[in-house]
Image (cartoon, grey):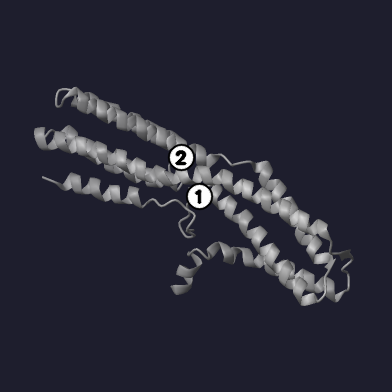
Amino acid sequence: MILRSFLRSRWALALKTLPFVALIVLVKFLVHGQQAEFLTLNSLFGAIISANIFLIGFLISGVLVDYKESEKLPSELSSHLEALTDEVSIVWQNKRDPVARAFLRELAEFSTLTVSWFYKKTRTDAMMKRLTGFNHFFLAFEPLTQANFIVRMKQDQAAIRRLLKRADTIRDTSFLGTGYAVAEIITCILAIGMIFVRMDPFYESVFFVSFVSFITIYMIMFIRFLDNPFEYRQTDHLVEEVSLKPLLDTQKRISAAINEK
C-alpha cells in the first residue's frame, strides 16, 4: 500500500524515467568495456545540451498556459452546475412541482456523466445532447418562476457548453508536435554521443551521462503529461492530472438537494 502510494506521488514520473537512464548507463558500460569510445569531449556537446534545454523550456512555457487554464475548468463547471441546482431548488421549495424534482435528478445524472466524460467513457456528442435537453425543463419552468430565473439558468447552460468544448479542445490538441519531435531527436543524439564520448576518469563520465540523460528525458516526459492534463486513468493517477474533486463534491451537493423535503 505504501509502495503504491509512493508510485502515485510526485516521484512517479521520476521512477518512469529511471529505466531509460539505466539502459543508457548500461550501454555506456558495455561500450567502455569494448573500448569503442571514439568521440572526444568538446564544446559542441555543451552547445547541444544548451540548445536542447532552450527548446524544452520553450515547450514548457507553451503547455503551461493551457495547463493553468485546465486547472480552472472542473471548478468552473461545478460552479455552474451548483448555480443551476440552487435555482431549481428555489423553484422546488416554492412550488413543489415535480418538474423541479425531475430536473434536480437530471442535474445529478449530468454531473456523473461529466466525470465519466473526463475519463473518456462518455462521448462529447452525448454530453452536448444531454445539455441541450435542459431546454425542455426551462420551457416547463416558464409558468413556475420569473423570467430572469430562466435567463440565469440559460446562461449557466451556455457556460457549461463552452467549458466542455474548451476542455475537449485541450484534450484533443497537442501543443507543437514538431517541437516534441525535435526535442526527442536532440535528446537521442545527445545520449548516443555521450555513450561514445571518451571522458576520463570513466566514472565521472558515467555520472554526467546519467545526470544529463535523466534531466532531458524527465523534462520531455513531463511536458507530454502537462500537454494533456485530462488524461485520466483508473489505475495510474499522476499529480499532473487536473483534480476532479470539485465535480465529485458537486455530485454530493446535488444529491443532498434532491433529498431535501
- Compared across the picture, whether 88 is left or right of 237 comes to left
The residue type indicated by label 1 comes to Glu
Residue drawn where x is 78% and y is 70% of the image:
28
- The percent coordinates of residue 187 (x first, y second) are 72, 55
Residue drawn where x is 14% and y is 46% of the image:
260
The residue type indicated by label 2 comes to Ala
Can you name the residue that lies furthest to the front here? 43
Residue 17, quarter of picture: bottom right
Image quadrant containing the C terminus: top left
Image quadrant containing the N terminus: bottom left
> Judging from the image, what secondary structure is the residue with disc 2 in?
helix
> Judging from the image, what secondary structure is the residue with disc 1 in?
loop
Residue drawn where x is 26% and y is 41% of the image:
82
The residue identified by callout 2 is 167
- Pick whichever of labels 1 and 2 is earlier in the sequence: 2
Q: Which mark is residue 56?
A: none
**Which of 4/181 is in front?**
181
The residue identified by callout 1 is 231
